Image: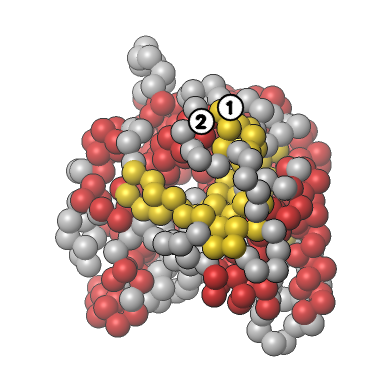
């Protein structure tokens, strides 16, 4: 916990930082969205704006050009490996991930890229997470929706956007998948100053970030991820088992809206399009992979075929205490034949939640938290190193 506080003081989107007590540096880089831009625009332009932001998603400049930060070993040579760290739904701060990234750098000896999902972290206007500006919109939402549960200023922006159009969950995920594909191709083509050509890219993914990487690996439109590894923590479930109804994720109305939409309308649309004989574009591959990750039942066997092929490249750690991404959903994702091999459930010896697996509330023995932290990241290091 003390280390997290230190790292938060040093962390910067603007400056190169050399950590004074460890051979680790952090370097910010600018990302400008190019790959898939037209495909994303065609999906996002018709989407209904949320009341608090009456403009199209395509006009949010912070989402199209932004900075990401790389934690790396302090050395001059270019690296032939990278780990991309993905975060959870409705997150605005990298704070809890800083110690995670540093630990992976120290134990795996490779750079860790902290990459934000579309319309998360620093990819939104600052007003979207400013309590004073959001409170009137929260009060309005509570007045318009009777008996609204789990509404808060923290989740009102995302909840309002998803209520206005549940399709945003898909469009933002698609945009993030294209962004990751662009980043990975830049790395592999030697266009990034930290990495050598043909670098191997692995992933450490938490929560909804795990679903994003599963879709990316399953689709693999450039056929460049056949050797990539994925370690998930509190993530990897089929969509049907996820429950984001929480004051710091989304409120109950938004949760029910997206659940109804994706388990019915979105899947039905996929079934009606299966007879189309069109070339498999990246957009179509991403969409088919996402559809495969929605229901508990693996219709057509696409999901099982993917995990069978990738069983040596994916490991998943879940928490028994987790009600947002439950273990049963993670096991259903990979199938009963592979679940015992690919999925491991841990139980921490203290009260915790999906959102805060390593709490610093003064009520829990810090040594217990550290033991649990090590339990997760030693497994990650063994798998990713």
Q: Residues within 10 Å of mark 2 (few under 14, many from 20)?
A: some
Instruction: For the residues labelled 1 and 2, say whether their Cβ atoms are less than 8 Å apart.
Output: yes
Please name the residue shown 45% across and 26% down the image. Answer: 285
Q: Give me the C-alpha separation between circle 1 and circle 2.
A: 7 Å
> Residue 64 location, x and y as percent?
31, 48
Furthest toward the front, the residue is 76
Mark 2 = which residue?
A: 190
Instruction: Tell me the tag on residue 2.
Output: none
Quadrant into which the N terminus falls: bottom right
Q: In the picture, residue 77 is in which quadrant?
A: top right
Q: Nearer the viewer, residue 12 or 34?
A: 12
Would residue 65 be found to the left or right of residue 380 on screen? left
Q: Residues within 10 Å of mark 1 (few under 14, many from 20)?
A: some
Q: Is residue 162 visible?
A: no
Q: In terms of secondary structure, where does tag 2 sit?
A: loop
Mark earlier in primary sequence (1, 2): 2
> Residue 286 location, x and y as percent?
45, 32
Mark 1 = which residue?
A: 198
Q: In terms of secondary structure, where does tag 1 sit?
A: strand
> Residue 337 location, x and y as percent?
77, 33
Please name the residue shown 43% across and 35% down the image. Answer: 182
């Amino acid at each position: 916990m003390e280390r997290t506080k230190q790292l938060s003081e040093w962390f910067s989107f603007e400056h190169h930082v050399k950590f004074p007590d460890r051979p680790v540096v952090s370097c910010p880089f600018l990302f400008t969205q190019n790959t898939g831009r037209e495909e994303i625009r065609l999906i996002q332009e018709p989407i209904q704006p949320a009341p608090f932001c009456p403009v199209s998603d395509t006009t949010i400049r912070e989402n199209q050009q932004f900075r990401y930060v790389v934690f790396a070993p302090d050395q001059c040579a270019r690296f032939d490996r990278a780990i991309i760290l993905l975060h959870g739904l409705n997150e605005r701060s990298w704070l809890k991930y800083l110690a995670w990234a540093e630990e992976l750098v120290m134990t795996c000896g490779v750079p860790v890229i902290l990459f934000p999902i579309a319309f998360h972290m620093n990819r939104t206007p600052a007003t979207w997470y400013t309590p004073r500006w959001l409170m009137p919109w929260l009060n309005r939402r509570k007045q318009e929706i009777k008996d609204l549960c789990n509404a808060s200023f923290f989740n009102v922006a995302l909840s309002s956007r998803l209520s206005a159009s549940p399709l945003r969950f898909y469009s933002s995920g698609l945009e993030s998948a294209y962004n990751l594909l662009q980043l990975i191709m830049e790395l592999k083509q030697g266009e990034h100053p930290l990495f050598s050509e043909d670098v191997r890219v692995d992933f450490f993914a938490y929560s909804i970030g795990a679903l994003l990487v599963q879709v990316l690996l399953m689709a693999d439109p450039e056929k460049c991820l056949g050797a990539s590894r994925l370690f998930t923590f509190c993530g990897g479930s089929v969509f049907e088992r996820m429950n984001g109804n929480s004051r710091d994720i989304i409120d109950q109305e938004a949760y029910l809206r997206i659940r109804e939409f994706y388990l019915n309308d979105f899947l039905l649309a996929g079934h009606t399009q299966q007879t189309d004989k069109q070339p498999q574009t990246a957009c179509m591959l991403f969409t088919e992979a996402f559809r495969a990750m929605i229901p508990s039942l693996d219709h057509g066997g696409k999901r099982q075929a993917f995990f069978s092929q990738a069983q040596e490249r994916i490991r998943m750690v879940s928490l028994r205490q987790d009600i947002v991404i439950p273990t049963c959903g993670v096991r259903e994702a990979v199938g009963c034949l592979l679940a015992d091999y690919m999925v491991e459930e841990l139980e921490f010896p203290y009260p915790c939640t999906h959102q805060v697996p390593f709490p610093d509330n003064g009520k829990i023995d810090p040594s217990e938290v550290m033991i649990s932290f090590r339990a997760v990241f030693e497994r990650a290091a063994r798998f990713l190193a």
